[in-house]
């Protein structure tokens, strides 16, 4: 259980990271706003409270691994990594620029703290499964976390990976689905209904939890429960809001891949400052 | 060249040796371990063997994850599924990040035989060769396969190795070396050069014998590495013999023939004849029948040699 003080601090951090994401996207004028904002609270708990990692030693073998399977939420990841000290916050201004170490989608060879390359949907979770296998073979204490989008799970490879993680009993693996209900072409239930997600993972013999993906305490508690389960992989279905934190971005598929303009940034920062 | 060995058999045995030497070697398969011969490894090292089931995309992604975790994964299935079904996984999860994954595809080419065109990969070398960071190997025989697999294991980065189904004549010595990126001149000659890969190298040696009886001196250069291609050896052959015949159990588009032509066009244009499948798929038949049907025998190489000599 997190103390009230811890929750307040993590909420402050998440708010700060949202500001970073919006500024980054406003500067680059390219990138994915909605899905970065929906994922921030989960990623804040992972990077600032849950994962064992050392920003001064990104290659630490016993670190927990994070695979951003929904690689288009790279701005959220970069905000976390810069915030934790993997690289200077100044670098965030170079997002998507020629020569930047901050590519449009995560690149392990360019960005300190990025564990694998992702961006082509459905592939990150397979790599997370492989990482969990390697971790177990090497008898390392690390846990492997992967974050998927709820549109992403339309990719058949996700279910191949899901099957294999259960088959190999990867209790050190935790997949979190950022269920914001929207994808580029509209609502996931209209484009290609993937629901009900929890029962699907359950049917694949996973340990399944469902939480409010913006409730810091609930996220933390779910991660505790995931860690306590050592025989099966855990899926956490995190119910989220696309564009969360900025009212005029929320619940809008049209902001999937659209950065804020000058006016939107100003209003968004003002709104976040008041919260 | 009377002895015949299947390259996949040597692969299976070499994997077991590598497994004994290095605990980081892990193996993945997609329900074809009996055919790819990875089953040998699975029996000795069950904890380091991962069957993905019939799911090549996930197998490839898991291999990438295992490499990210410090292991040396060998992932195997038939060439048509490895390079075809899992292409985008190889691109995104293996080649783009430069992961230390070895994709060893068996059942390459038409000598798959009776299963037919659906299972005969005639395009895998072209597909894999087009990927940045990817190394592409295609050994000629059993001994070279063992050496190539060891070279792939020692190399840090993505490697695609193409092996076959059937038994093929032994060309190399049992203790041969394999250097990635280096071809081998198996027979010297001055009138033309056969530049070949895979099982076609044995045919080229036979063709050179036939041509010798006609007082035509044919050099035979084997390229066990399709990429990076041995530019120096290819250009030297062109300069010294002035005519080239390429031969591969693959489409003439984009594989060995394509790579040699690209090299020659930029470095030393000479007449070239490409022997391979002429932009077509295979079909059912025995391996021997198919090699004859698609023009992949020593006799066809002799005809190609005569055509290229006429253009000199």
Image: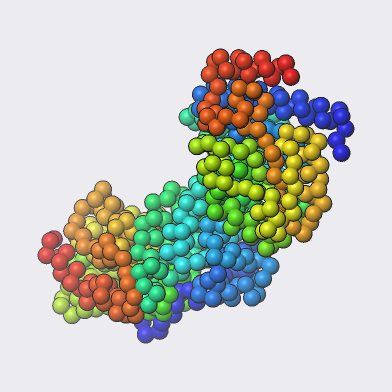
Image quadrant where residue B21 sits:
bottom right
Quarter of the image where the N terminus of chain B is located: bottom left
Residue furthest out toward the bottom: B2
Front-lying residue, B298 or A89: A89
Front-lying residue, B157 or A275: A275
Residue at 19% across, 76% down:
B211
| Residue B290 placement (x, y as % from top left) | 30, 76
In the picture provided, is A157 more to the left or to the right than B105?
right
Q: Is residue B189 visible?
A: yes
Q: Is residue A100 visible?
A: no
Image quadrant where residue B310 sits:
bottom left
| Residue B255 placement (x, y as % from top left) | 33, 59
Residue at 69% across, 50% down:
A198
In the picture provided, is A85 more to the left or to the right than B98?
right
Quarter of the image where the C terminus of chain B is located: bottom left
Vertical placement of residue B115 versus A46, above or below? below
| Residue B270 placement (x, y as % from top left) | 19, 56
């Amino acid at each position: 259980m997190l103390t009230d003080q811890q929750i307040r601090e993590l909420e402050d951090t998440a708010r700060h990271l949202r500001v970073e994401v919006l500024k980054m996207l406003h500067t680059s004028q390219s990138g994915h706003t909605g899905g970065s904002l929906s994922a921030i609270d989960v990623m804040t708990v992972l990077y600032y409270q849950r994962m064992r990692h050392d920003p001064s030693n990104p290659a630490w073998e016993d670190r927990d691994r994070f695979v951003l399977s929904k690689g288009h939420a790279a701005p959220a990841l970069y905000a976390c990594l810069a915030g934790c000290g993997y690289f200077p916050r100044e670098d965030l201004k170079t997002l998507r620029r020629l020569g930047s170490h901050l590519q449009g989608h995560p690149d392990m060879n360019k960005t300190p703290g990025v564990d694998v390359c992702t961006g082509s949907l459905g592939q990150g979770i397979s790599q997370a499964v492989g990482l969990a296998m390697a971790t177990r073979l090497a008898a390392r204490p690390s846990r492997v976390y992967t974050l998927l989008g709820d549109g992403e799970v339309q990719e058949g490879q996700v279910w191949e990976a899901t099957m294999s993680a259960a088959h190999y009993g990867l209790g050190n693996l935790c997949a979190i689905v950022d269920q914001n209900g929207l994808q580029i072409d509209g609502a996931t239930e209209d484009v290609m209904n993937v629901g009900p997600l929890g029962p699907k993972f359950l049917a694949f013999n996973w340990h399944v939890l469902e939480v409010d993906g913006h409730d810091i305490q609930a996220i933390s508690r779910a991660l505790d429960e995931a860690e306590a389960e050592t025989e099966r992989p855990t899926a956490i279905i995190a119910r989220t809001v696309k564009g969360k934190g900025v009212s005029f971005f929320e619940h809008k598929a049209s902001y999937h891949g659209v950065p804020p303009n000058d006016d939107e940034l100003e209003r968004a920062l003002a709104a976040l400052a008041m919260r | 060249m009377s002895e015949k060995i299947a390259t996949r058999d040597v692969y299976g045995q070499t994997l077991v040796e590598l497994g004994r030497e290095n605990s980081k070697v892990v193996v993945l398969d997609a329900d074809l371990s009996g055919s790819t011969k990875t089953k040998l490894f699975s029996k000795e090292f069950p904890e380091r063997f991962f069957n993905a089931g019939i799911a090549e995309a996930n197998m490839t992604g898991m291999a990438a994850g295992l490499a990210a975790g410090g292991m040396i994964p060998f992932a195997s299935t038939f060439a048509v599924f490895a390079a075809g079904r899992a292409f985008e996984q190889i691109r995104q999860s293996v080649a783009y990040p430069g992961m230390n994954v070895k994709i060893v595809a068996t059942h390459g080419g038409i000598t798959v035989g009776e299963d037919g065109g659906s299972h005969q990969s005639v395009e895998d070398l072209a597909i894999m060769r087009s990927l940045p960071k990817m190394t592409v190997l295609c050994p000629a025989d059993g001994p070279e396969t063992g050496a190539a697999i060891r070279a792939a294991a020692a190399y840090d980065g993505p490697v695609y190795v193409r092996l076959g189904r059937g038994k093929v004549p032994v060309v190399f010595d049992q203790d041969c070396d394999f250097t990635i990126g280096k071809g081998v001149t198996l027979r010297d000659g001055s009138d033309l050069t056969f530049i070949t890969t895979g099982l076609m190298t044995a045919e080229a040696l036979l063709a050179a014998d036939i041509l010798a009886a006609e007082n035509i001196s044919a050099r035979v250069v084997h390229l066990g590495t399709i990429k990076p291609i041995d530019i120096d050896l290819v250009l030297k052959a062109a300069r010294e013999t002035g005519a080239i015949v390429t031969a591969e159990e693959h489409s003439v588009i984009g594989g060995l023939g394509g790579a040699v032509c690209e090299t020659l066009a930029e470095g030393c244009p000479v007449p070239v004849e490409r022997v391979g499948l002429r932009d077509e798929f295979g079909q059912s038949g025995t391996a021997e029948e198919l090699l004859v049907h698609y023009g992949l025998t020593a006799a066809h190489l002799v005809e190609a040699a005569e055509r290229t000599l006429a253009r000199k």
